Image (cartoon, helix red, strand yellow):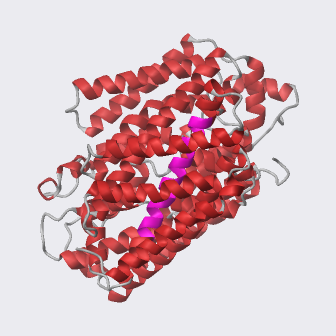
């Protein structure tokens, strides 16, 4: 299908508009590195929360989510939050966001100095983190490119690679020129646009009133939230290879649960880390994470609405590609409305892409160029070199994307291969006092080597086995290496603990900090953080269920869910909101 000229006009006007944002605020963003990369560390929490919401909604991810809904039904809520690790946002809300802001650094890699001090080993840890982050950013850009190509090929008379380059080019303009100001300003507008799109498409589904009838045509168990050990009979025969590993649903969720625990405890390692550094205070970072977690419901509204509209169009057809449901629905919308939703989905994509590009440039500039090669260059010159690095990262991610056809394959390669390399070592940095910089570097390198060798020699292993083996091996490697190396200097650890106040295995350091009067003897913050780490995922899960019960007109389940959500919200008011850092803490 080719778009009507009205729809194309809407899309072009939108693309030109966001590109102009970067040009218009170029002067403000270029006044210094803090302004360019962290927006002057002065963003209101509600602005960051709104902007962050759209940065986690993209075309490829939403197409994969609709595909998961198409094949797994309501059980996809378990799968995405546990197996794909979306509960990490609840961890940001509970404790990670304020910890990150307290560090006061500029990059994810620079944080290592806060934890390990300024030694040769700490420098190696910083360099290892920077290299990992660059690799991860390239894989993220690759995933974005796969989604762009698969979506756009149904609408434009162009090849996948051509449409990808066009979108990458527009995003590159407003991010490289506007820096983080460009990211935030466009993300706020794009979140509003996404919200409008979610409301419109939800109204379309609700007005049809066919949700229950459509669900009745699906396999038994498709509309049930209850986890099962295996999915329904006939699942393998009706599902493409990229989704067949979900058939063993129970084992996959158990393995995914262990992966998810480390995903939450390790904290963010991509653009979200930088997002939380831009607020005025640790309190504002936590509030921004709360807004972020709550507004993520928009993604579910869009996905379930597109799914139900798609099921109505597909009817009794078999063998349809679930990842193509979203383009199918847009192709059946009236003229003008199709263009609107193209702009909505481009907004979702670009808000994610812009944050990735900005972080990539930040890492290259502050962790490589400025630190090792061009120490005496002016800040404007360094910013210019970071802009060039953004363009290079886009091109590398684009070329990597040519190796993938399925969105979910690109996604799971990124999170279960690349991200898993750092999960356990990154967790230990926050939560184990004797884990040193040298232990971090060697455990990360050893885990990476193990995963690569496993992929080379045992590539035929099912996902449940390979992921479980990788996590278990990484845990053993990390603990052993941690004990084989000396802890970080105690003064550095005491300073870190007193500033961040993390929970975990910190008893010797905590006692010394209490003895020096740096933290209260009966400080309840770590305990409350752990408690909120258990409650916030429940809050996030209940929010995700709202669109299902509303659009499917399952009123009984909806009112029960609303009641439970209200109860959890009241609990969080006392356990989370009342215990946020003070407004005076900077």
364 in magenta: yes
The residue most toward the bottom is 207
**Left or right of residue 262: residue 516:** right
Task: Give the total number of marks visible in the rendering.
Answer: 0
Where residue 304 appears, as percent x and y from the top left, is 36, 70
Q: In this view, does 388 lie above or below 240?
A: above
The image shows residue 20 at horizontal and vertical percentages of 57, 66
Residue drawn at point x = 58 percent, y = 20 percent: 124
Is the magenta region chiefly helix, strand or loop? helix
Residue at 73 percent across and 24 percent down: it is 493
**Can residue 143 be seen here?**
yes
- Residue 218: image location, x then y, percent: 21, 70
- The foreground one among 34 and 210 is 34
Quadrant in which the N terminus is drawn:
bottom left
Decide: is 35 above or below 205: above
Question: For this rendering, which residue is in front, 373 or 568?
Answer: 373
User: Which corner quadrant of the image does residue 164 belong to?
Assistant: bottom left
Q: Which sits in the foreground, 101 or 466?
A: 101
**Taking the image as drawn, is residue 576 in sight?**
no
> Along the horizontal axis of the image, is 297 left or right of 2?
right
In the rendered image, the vertical position of residue 533 relative to residue 63, given as above or below: above
Q: Is residue 508 magenta?
A: no
- To which quarter of the image does residue 150 belong? bottom left
The extreme right residue here reads 517
User: Within the image, what quadrant is residue 375 found in?
Assistant: top right
The x, y position of residue 437, in whole percent, is: 60, 20
Residue range in magenta is: 344-365
Would you say 488 lies left or right of 428 here?
Answer: right
């Amino acid at each position: 299908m080719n778009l009507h000229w009205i729809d194309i006009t809407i899309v072009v006007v939108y693309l030109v508009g966001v590109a102009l944002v970067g040009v218009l605020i170029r002067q403000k963003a270029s006044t210094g590195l803090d302004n360019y990369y962290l927006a002057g560390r002065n963003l209101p929490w509600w602005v960051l929360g709104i902007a962050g919401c759209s940065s986690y909604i993209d075309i490829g991810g939403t197409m994969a989510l609709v595909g998961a809904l198409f094949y797994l039904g309501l059980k996809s809520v378990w799968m995405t939050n546990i197996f794909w690790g979306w509960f990490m946002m609840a961890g940001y809300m509970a404790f990670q966001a304020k910890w990150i802001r307290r560090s006061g650094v500029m990059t994810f890699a620079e944080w290592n100095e806060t934890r390990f001090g300024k030694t040769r080993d700490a420098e190696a840890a910083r360099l290892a983190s920077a290299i990992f982050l660059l690799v991860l950013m390239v894989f993220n850009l690759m995933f974005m490119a796969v989604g762009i190509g698969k979506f756009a090929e149904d609408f434009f008379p162009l090849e996948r690679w051509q449409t990808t380059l066009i979108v990458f080019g527009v995003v590159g303009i407003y991010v490289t020129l506007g820096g983080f100001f460009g990211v935030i300003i466009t993300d706020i507008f794009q979140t509003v646009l996404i919200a409008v799109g979610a409301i419109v498409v939800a109204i379309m589904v609700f007005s049809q009133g066919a949700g229950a009838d459509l669900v009745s045509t699906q396999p038994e168990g498709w509309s049930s939230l209850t986890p099962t050990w295996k999915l329904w009979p006939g699942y393998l025969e009706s599902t493409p290879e990229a989704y067949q590993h979900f058939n063993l649903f129970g084992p996959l969720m158990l393995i995914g649960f262990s992966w998810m625990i480390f995903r939450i405890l390790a904290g963010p390692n991509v653009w979200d880390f930088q997002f939380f550094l831009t607020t005025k205070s640790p309190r504002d970072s936590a509030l921004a994470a709360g807004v972020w977690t709550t507004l993520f419901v928009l993604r579910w509204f869009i996905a379930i609405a597109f799914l139900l509209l798609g099921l109505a169009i597909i009817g009794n057809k078999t063998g349809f590609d679930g990842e193509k449901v979203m383009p199918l629905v847009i192709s059946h919308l009236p003229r003008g409305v199709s263009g609107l939703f193209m702009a909505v989905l481009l907004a979702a994509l670009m808000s994610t892409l812009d944050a990735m590009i900005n972080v990539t440039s930040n890492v290259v500039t502050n962790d490589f160029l400025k630190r090792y090669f061009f120490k005496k260059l002016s800040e404007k010159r360094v910013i210019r070199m970071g802009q060039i690095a953004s363009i290079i990262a886009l091109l590398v991610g684009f070329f990597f994307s040519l190796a993938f056809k399925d969105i979910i394959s690109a996604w799971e390669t990124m999170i279960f291969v690349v991200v898993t390399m750092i999960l356990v070592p990154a967790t230990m940095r926050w939560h184990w006092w004797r884990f040193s910089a040298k232990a971090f570097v060697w455990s990360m390198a050893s885990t990476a080597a193990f995963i690569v060798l496993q992929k080379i020699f045992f590539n035929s292993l099912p996902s449940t086995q390979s992921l479980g083996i990788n996590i278990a091996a990484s845990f053993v490697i990390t603990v052993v290496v941690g004990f084989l190396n000396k802890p970080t200097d105690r003064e550095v650890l005491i300073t870190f603990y007193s500033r961040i106040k993390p929970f975990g295995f910190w008893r010797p350091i905590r006692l010394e900090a209490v003895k020096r009067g740096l933290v209260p003897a009966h400080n309840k913050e770590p305990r409350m953080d752990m408690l909120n780490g258990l409650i916030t995922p429940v809050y996030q899960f209940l929010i995700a269920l709202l669109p299902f019960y509303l659009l499917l007109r399952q009123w009984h389940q909806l009112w029960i869910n609303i009641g439970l959500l209200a109860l959890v919200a009241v609990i969080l008011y006392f356990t989370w909101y009342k215990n946020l850092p003070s407004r005076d803490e900077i």
